[in-house]
Amino acid sequence: MSALAQRIDVDVAAEPELTDGFHLVIDALKLNDITTIYGVPGIPITDLGRLAQAAGMRVISFRHEQHAGNAAAIAGFLTKKPGICLTVSAPGFLNGLTALANATTNCFPMILISGSSEREIVDLQQGDYEEMDQLAIAKPLCKAAFRVLHAADIGIAVARAIRAAVSGRPGGVYLDLPAKLFSQVMEAEAGAKSLVKVIDAAPAQLPAPSAIKRALDVLKSAKRPLIVLGKGAAYAQADDEVRALVETSGIPYVPMSMAKGLLPDTHPQSAGAARSLVLKEADVVLLVGARLNWLLSHGKGKTWGAPGSKKFIQIDIEPKEMDSNVEIVAPIVGDIGSCVTALLDGMKGDWQAPPKSWTDAISAKKEENLSKMASKLRKNSTPMDFHGALGALKTIIAERPDAILVNEGANTLDLARGIIDMYQPRKRLDVGTWGIMGIGMGFAIAAAVETGKPVLAVEGDSAFGFSGMEVETICRYNLPVCIVVFNNNGIYRGTDTDPTGRDPGTTVFVRDSRYDRMMEAFGGVGVNATTPDELSQAVNAAMDSGRPTLINAVIDPQAGTESGNIGSLNPTSTVKKKPA
Ligand code: ADP
Ligand code: MG
């Protein structure tokens, strides 16, 4: 055979290298620097998780999809890259959907990827295994939803999902991958060419110069200006710019819950401890990545003082946010980094700090409130009350400012938010816009995985119950998570009874439970703490060792108020009827 003939022969015989849907999904994510998946394995995505792990991705398997979804969402908040949640079809998808909706509500970028059943059978409603039109159900609950039917489209679909999640106002995206897609085979070279690396996924959005000028004119006219920092400002990672705006302007600020630590809560310009005063008295309010929703009393009512006493300036990336609840006299639409920089540029030269009478009034109120609080925090009673226990945790975060605080509950949430000072950006993760319970373990796990920092999860006993089984996940991955369960025997308080005497009251749990033993069941450290000293010793030991730890903090069942600080949102009946 001639040399030429021999070569042709070899070429014809050589099989082209192949790839399939599984590998293309993984390659598409990796190409876009997405290296972690949070999920629960099962039909049809079991092999996807396995292959992703083999390809070097971190795959964190949970016990329930909602917590994997919450983990993905908060990973998105912490990194500005979409967090990935991977679930099975129908029920697994629905479990993940709560987290997807919550992410969208909170403006956290995430992508829920769910396997689904066969289109032909689902659409004819012929009763497939886990049959459900998942795409239609996801659509109203997220920013965008896509289905992929051909392996060659996976690259484009992943690119669109990433862009949709992080550009403009971030949020949740759903990606529907029918079972058949995963085993579709195509030539590897064509497959590689079909992938898309997203360039500039969240482009800077510069504000119009006229909008900046309008805002500065209003700000300069203020006698009692105030800045409100929201979690959009924390998400933006424009930490230096935001700090410069506050310090250059000299304007007092209040942080929303998850914006705490953007500047240290001990900053002299923080008006956090005089929140009621400043919201009521301010004449011009600059909102930076904070919405005038229920958490800010919709910008009106008693909280905000006399009607018409305020002018609002708002920085937001979402133009539709403007005038959502009240008139915004100076809307600034753009990304926070660019908007704040433009404001700073405009302040050069003739900027005047706010009147001293205003800042002095705030300082006086702060001092008064802080000294009232200080004695409560030193209380060393047994069983503990909320303040005594939180006083111990406040000291720990002051000594370990790079630890991440996860916080949920009712009283446990409301009091911790006010008491525990934060010192660094994006260290406080909590129930967010919906005030949702159940984020605890998902957030704690992702915080540990994404940052490698120690995590302190301060949990009401009820709140913990929503995601408590994930302590096994924490032990399995040996994560540096210390959970403190504020155990007051129930929801709000542990004192409810059934008026008929038949059953336990509706808001109480088993008395004197030992949540610490749940952690011991999986090889972690469990501690029962009955005093603030025992509590702080146990937390410090956990933070030093990095070992998964759960501390059952015994709180007086009488302590706590119904619905915490938001009792006014909870209707109560005034009609009296005799028990049956
Ligand atoms: P908080 O509850 O802390 O007040 P919200 O979630 O209500 O915060 O508001 C966050 C706001 O931040 C949203 O309106 C969102 O559109 C906006 N936002 C998010 N990221 C950015 C960004 N990079 N630039 C500008 N605005 C942003
Ligand atoms: Mg409780």
Image (cartoon, rainbow, N blue to C red):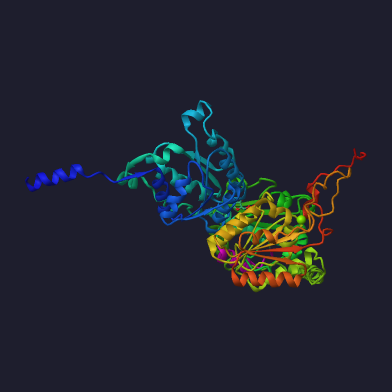
Magenta region includes residue 241:
yes
State the residue at coordinates (81%, 65%).
383
Q: From the image, which quarter does the N terminus lie in?
A: top left
Q: Can residue 88 be seen in this snapshot?
A: yes
Give the side of residue 362 with respect to residue 349, left or right: right
x then y, percent, for residue 17:
29, 46
Looking at the image, the residue that sits furthest to the left is 2
x then y, percent, for residue 234:
59, 59
Nearer to the camera, 320 or 421: 421
x then y, percent, for residue 74:
58, 55
Nearer to the camera, 102 or 288: 102
Q: Can residue 226 be seen in this snapshot?
A: no
Q: From the image, which quarter does the C terminus lie in?
A: top right
Give the side of residue 423 with respect to residue 377, left or right: left
State the residue at coordinates (84%, 53%).
495
User: Residue 282's quadrant in the figure?
Assistant: bottom right
User: Residue 457's quadrant in the figure?
Assistant: bottom right
Give the side of residue 89 with respect to residue 557, left or right: left
User: Residue 228's quadrant in the figure?
Assistant: bottom right
Q: Which residues are magenta?
A: 238-253
| Number of numbered discs on residues | 0
Please determine whether, in this image, residue 560 is positioned above or below residue 117: below
Please determine whether, in this image, residue 172 is positioned above or below residue 287: above
Please determine whether, in this image, residue 260 is positioned above or below residue 576: below
Ligand 2's quadrant = bottom right
Query: For the stretch drawn in magenta, what is the main secondary structure?
Result: helix
Nearer to the camera, 566 or 556: 556
x then y, percent, for residue 484:
69, 63
Magenta region includes residue 86:
no
